[in-house]
Amino acid sequence: MNRVFEWQDAPEAEFAVIGDPVSHSLSPKMHLAAYASLGLPFRYVAIQVAPGDVRASLELLKKRGYWGVNVTVPHKEEALGWPTEVEPLALHVRAANTLDLRSGACINTDAPGFMETLAPLKVPRKDALVLGAGGSARALVYALVEAGWQVRIFNRTHEKAEAMAEEIGGRAVSVAAPENAGLILNTTSASLSGSDLPIAWAETAPDAIAYDLMYAKEPTPFLRTAAAHGLRTVDGRPLLAAQGALSFEWWLSRPAPRQVMLEALG
Ligand code: NDP
């Protein structure tokens, strides 16, 4: 667990992650490991910000001399209201996870970070069943569609899947049937409540990969069930490392120590 600061009490530092909650975030550990490996004297802290306070907290962090901020759940959309220069991708998917307080610019590194993590997985077919239609699904579905994938979207609230497909791309489905999918991507927060998802696992191709954006000490219910059906599984740590490396590089204009960052996540 991180030491967490309320935003009004933010200490002197160069970088931070803001969220609600933020105590569980592995970003401080990962970025501090990167700085240590390169002998950089930077500090990176976890800051608690309640919904509605994002703008005020960023103004204060800027005044206190912060250079950059990562944004996690649930603030990625609210953060778009602060900076002056929003990258087109972040604007389109309505989510910014990386802000430069020096310039007022923001970008989304979840989408390109996610695509980086797919390369070594050698997914057998560019055909994905995406579970969930929240903020992270928007960014990832956009990245997949742009890269020429067939994307099916299943969500507990079907209308949200339909609205997202209309706006971003892909096709909303009312049953989570993964036949032919090379990738089954869980972007829901169902694991937070320990829930499993209504997936027709028996119809899954045996070479498909189950990928969960969430990570925890133990495999999530989604990954446990996928593994029980013989599928290869990936949790959210490679994505956390990839999006963090892209943030690092954007802030500091130098290559990030990707392996160090991944290993810091355990
Ligand atoms: P949102 O709150 O925007 O969306 C949550 C989604 O989960 C919605 O589609 C919601 O469905 C669905 N959902 C929630 N609870 C359940 C449940 N019990 N059963 C079925 N579906 C459920 O969250 P985000 O998209 O921003 O983030 C989702 C998760 O991904 C978070 O846990 C986040 O930590 C993780 N994440 C990890 C990253 C990484 O670096 N590893 C990067 C980005 C996100 P409905 O529409 O019906 O409410």
Image (cartoon, helix red, strand yellow):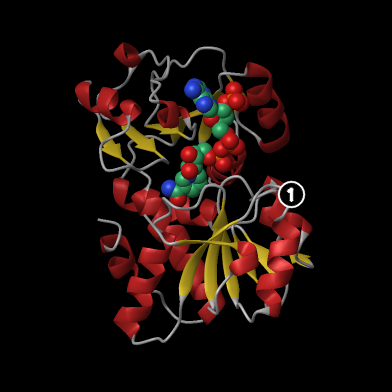
Judged left or right of residue 66, residue 77 is: right
Q: Which residue is mark 1?
A: 52
Foreground pick, 21 / 97: 21
Secondary structure type for disc 1? loop
Where is residue 87 drawn, in percent x and y?
70, 62
Report the side of 38 relative to 172 (left or right).
left
Labels in figure, total:
1
* Location of residue 54 with respect to 38 vertically, above or below: above
Residue found at the very far front of the displayed protein: 9
Asked if residue 250 is positioned above or below residue 198 in the image, the reply reads below
Q: Which quadrant of the view contains residue 89?
A: bottom right
Q: Which residue is found at the position 73% from the left and 35% from the top?
A: 167
Is residue 138 positioned above or below 181 on the image? below
Nearer-the-camera pick, 167 or 181:
167
Residue 255, quarter of the rendered image: bottom left
User: Closer to the camera, 171 or 47?
Assistant: 47
Kind of residue sitting beneath label 1: Gly
Please say if 196 is above or below 22. above
- Counting from the top left corner in percent of width and height, residue 18 is at 57, 58
Q: Whole-percent x and y of residue 242?
A: 42, 59
**Image quarter of the C terminus:** bottom left
Which part of the image, by quadrant, shows the N terminus?
bottom left
Whether label 1 lies within 8 Å of ligand 1 gets the answer: no
Q: Quadrant of residue 218?
A: top left
The answer to whether residue 178 shows anywhere in this view is yes
Q: Determine whether, in the image, residue 42 is placed left or right of residue 11.
A: left
Classify mark 1: residues with Cα within 10 Å, few (<14), some (14-19) or many (20+). Answer: few
Q: Position of residue 160 (x, y in %)?
A: 67, 24
Is residue 257 visible from the viewing direction of this image? Answer: no
**What residue is shown at x 64% (from left), y 82% (from top)?**
65
Residue beneath the point at 61% across and 77% down: 66
Q: Residue shown at 34%/84% (left/top)?
A: 38
